[in-house]
Amino acid sequence: MDERSSIVNIGGVEYEMLLTTRATKAIAKRYGGLENLGDKLMKAENFEMALDEVVWLVTLLCNQSIMIENLNNKDKQRELLSEEAVELLTSPFELSVCKDAIREALFKGTKRNVESEPDSKNVVAE
């Protein structure tokens, strides 16, 4: 598993959810940016629309790791996950678990490692 990913189980199969630049662009196109994603999910006009958004995100993020695997293994291509498959292989409860995995993948994908360097003005001369 990539340190930038989270795992979700769909129909008894584990999928790795991964936020890539490609996924970030797709999310930006659909929602106007990652920062608008939470608002859109929380303010979905009805239950069906909320489910549609979660299914779309699950499919998008799970397919990133599959596409990377396919890129690296040209002779052994895995089939991409479809929104229809996600809908058929999950229950609404399982999708709520997927929402946590989405949050985790987004958090890990946008995490920044900040390292501070000693400021030469603050170093004590010996």
Image: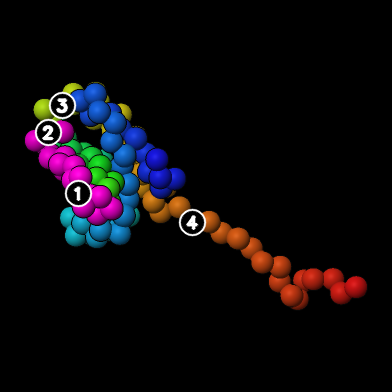
In the picture of the structure, the residue carrying the numbered disc 2 is 85
Residue 84 lies in magenta, yes or no?
yes
Instruction: Calculate the distance from the C-alpha at mark 2 to the C-alpha at mark 4.
Output: 33 Å
Which callout, 3 or 4, points to the residue nearer the camera? 3
The answer to whether residue 59 is visible is: yes
Residue 32 percent coordinates (x, y) = 23, 59
For the residue labelled by badge 3, is the local secondary structure a helix, a strand or a loop? helix
Stretch of the chain drawn in magenta: 70-86
In the picture of the structure, the residue carrying the numbered disc 3 is 89
For the residue labelled by badge 2, is the local secondary structure a helix, a strand or a loop? helix
Which callout, 2 or 4, points to the residue nearer the camera? 2
In the picture of the structure, the residue carrying the numbered disc 1 is 75
Query: How many badges with numbers are in the image?
Result: 4
In the picture of the structure, the residue carrying the numbered disc 4 is 112
Question: Which amino acid is tagged 2?
Answer: Ala
Question: Which amino acid is tagged 1?
Answer: Asp
